[in-house]
Image (cartoon, grey):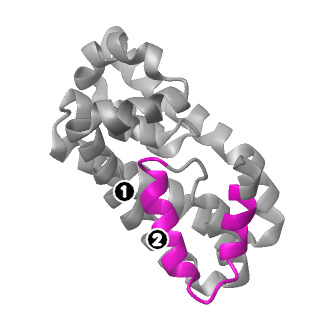
Amino acid sequence: MIRKLYDWVIGLAEHPRALWALALIAFIESSVFPIPPDVLMIPMIIAAPHRAFLIAGIATVSSVLGGLFGYWIGAALFEEVGRPVLEFYGKDAYFGEFSDRYNEWGAWAVLIAGVTPFPYKVITILSGTTGLSLPVFMVASIVARGFRFFIVAGLLWKFGPPIRDFIERRLGLMFTLFMVLLIGGFIAIRYLG
């Protein structure tokens, strides 16, 4: 089923309304959809590199708005929608212990999930469920999603198709390592300084 969704999303890149499709995919991916918008962004940018930053901007705005929808799901519809989404991604067992400490570190959680391969939708729902400050959620979402999508757009704009394999296979790992080093640096400064 996931492979069919993936192929369908890839096919949307050639559609005349691909920007609208990207906006929709980025929006629903932030709350419930399993395929990330990068899958659609990459072929769109390779086909039209002069539109790379427009494409990244649309993905960022739509993803953040979708994140707000995920936040609302967590705040208003957790039992009906949020819990089944967390169960689908196998994250429901961690919810109780994680939510107790979540608001203390919530901005970091949003940043990490917004940039790394961790499902951002889990964090958007969790943020609403735990009542993470909405301004904190919004700022962290804008920074994380913008960073992720504009890095992908910038790499494709600069290097074109040869960088595609790196982005698809290794960029998630690079973002994850970057976040580990960033957080590790802050922890080191706090405890060693």
Residue 96's place in the image compared with 66, above or below, is: above
Q: Residue furthest bottom?
A: 16
Secondary structure, magenta segment, majority class: helix
Q: Quadrant of residue 48?
A: bottom right
Quadrant of residue 28 within the rendered picture: bottom left
Image disc number at residue 66? 1
Residue 140 position within the rendered picture, expressed as x and y whole percent measured from the top left: 31, 45
Task: Name the residue: 42% across, 61% down.
Answer: 27
Front in this rendered view, residue 123 or 177: 123
Give the image location of residue 57, x and y in percent. 43, 71
Residue at position x 16%, y 46% from top?
135
- Which sits earlier in the primary sequence, circle 2 or circle 1? 2
Picture layout, residue 48 above or below residue 6: below
User: Is 26 placed left or right of 156 in the picture?
Assistant: left
Provide the residue designation for mark 2: 23
Give the amino acid type for the residue marked by disc 2 in the picture: Ala
Q: Position of residue 73 (x, y in %)?
A: 29, 43
Does the image show residue 107? Answer: no
Would you identify the image quadrant in which residue 17 lies?
A: bottom right
Tell me the magenta residue range: 5-32
Quarter of the image with the C terminus is top left
Report the Cα–Cα distance between label 2 and label 1. 9 Å
How many dots with numbers? Answer: 2
Dot 1: few (<14), some (14–19), or many (≥20) neighbours within 10 Å? many
Residue 121 falls inside the magenta stretch = no
